[in-house]
Image (tube, helix red, strand yellow):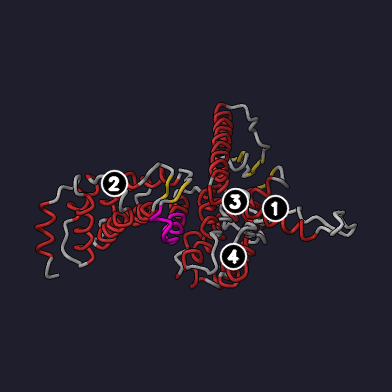
Amino acid sequence: TRNLGGLDALLDSLDFTEHSLGVIAVLSAKLQANADVSLDRISSFIMQSNPEQISFSPLSFASLVRLYGEECMRRQVPITAIQVLIKAIHNSQPQETTLTSLHAELCKLCLASKCLTPALPFLDLDYQDISEECASDSRYLLLFYYYGAMIYAANKNFGRALYFLEAVVTVPSSVISHIMFEAYKKYLLISLLIPDPSKDQQKLPKYTSPVINKFMKILCAPYHDIFSAFFTNKSDDLQDAIHKHLDTFTTDSNMGLIQQVVEAQIKMNIKRLTKTFLTLSLQDVASRVGIRSSADAERKLVEMIEEGSIQAHISQKDGMVRFDSNSEHFESVNMLQKLETNINNCINLDKQILLMDDEIILNPSFVRKSVLSSRELGEADDASMPSGGKTSSNFVSSGSKVPGYSM
């Protein structure tokens, strides 16, 4: 603290573009000492910083930007830092598809300011690499996907949100972090909000760490109760589960998702009716799916018709609903555009996988391990070979599995 005045004089003598590394050191020291620093001055530096110099000390630059974001949060002006964070990300990225620790900071600021749109272009990218400063602490990777899932859920893109939460929960780990714990709770709820939810959705992929499968169901028992009650197709069972664990859901700030799960069960029950009945009265619809009145049932049906979930006609004259078969013949312009987009995405994904495969094959570490594995396999075969040079009738080849791989 005694030298803060000297730091101000030093900062005034430095050029933001030509002396970016020096400015990072000075500003970081002032922020860590809780000195009064102008946010405009920090943002001005980040906007003018030299990407070439930043590449020599990415950890220091990322640390400074995170301190800046925290200071904006403390002063309750997170929205002012969003464009600055976007510039900082571009300056610190060697390429567009590289994930940095600043991506998580950007998502946090967007959530805090309730301005979600700026984060979407960064969330929609398929990242192929992780920066060194991000790889140094897995917390930033987990937070990026956790915050990203919350942003997608707020935008009703539940499919993408579920993918991000699955990425958090299935990260290789020997312990359960608090981020993974919270992500799993939301994973169970959001898995009920996607179109045509399935009971199998609670089963995580086979590559999930054993510790997750062993303890997570016990730790998140209230959420599993909700999951089970949802598929009973009875609104009373779901309401009972909610009231039983109401304090837990409120403490976890997940009541918004819980209410959406209640709505999702009603929609799923209405869809089940379309497979059983051709016509029903609005009152019958209300009683079968657990809606209070025929007027509420009509509003829900109109909502589902408008969003394309069901095909139906409502007669205002006699209060009857006629369910129709799907009128989509997959020949409209929108459907063809959607099909073309999906095909292009598959082609691009195939190209990315081939490039990654080439990189792995040419990686010196991979080549060295492959050679060592081949030698070990050869030595094992030689050791098992009978002395006469002829194979024993009892000899069974162990070559059914490639050494060094888990099959």
Q: Secondary structure at mark 1?
A: loop
The structure residue drawn at horizontal position 65% and vertical position 48%, both measured from the top left corner, is: 271
Q: Amino acid at mark 2?
A: Gln
To which residue does mark 2 refer?
83
Name the residue furthest right.
393
Q: Residue at x 66, y 57 (%)?
A: 406
Mark 2 and mark 1 lie on one chain; the one further toward the N terminus is 2
Mark 1 or mark 4: which is in front? Answer: 1
**Can you give x and y, in whole percent of width and height, for residue 222 in the image?**
57, 70
Residue 288 seen in render? no
Q: Amino acid at mark 3?
A: Lys
- Mark yes or no: residue 232 visible: yes
3D distance between C-alphas at marks 2 and 1: 49 Å
Tell me which segment is drawn in magenta: 132-145
Return the residue at label 3: 267
Q: CA distance from mark 3 to mark 4?
A: 16 Å
Q: Nearer the viewer, residue 199 or 89?
A: 89
Q: Which residue is mark 1?
A: 402
User: SS class of the residue under badge 3?
Assistant: helix
The residue nearer to you, when weighing 342 against 372, is: 372
Which one is in front in this view, the residue at disc 1 or the one at disc 3? 1
Q: Which mark is residue 226?
A: 4
Tell me the crowding category of disc 4: few under 14, some 14 to 19, or many 20 or more residues within 10 angstroms, Cα based.
many
| Residue pictured at 54% horizontal, 53% vertical | 162
Q: CA distance from mark 1 to mark 4?
A: 43 Å
In the image, 279 versus 211, the foreground residue is 211
Tag nearer the camera, 2 or 1: 1
- What residue is at 58 percent from the left and 66 percent from the top? 212
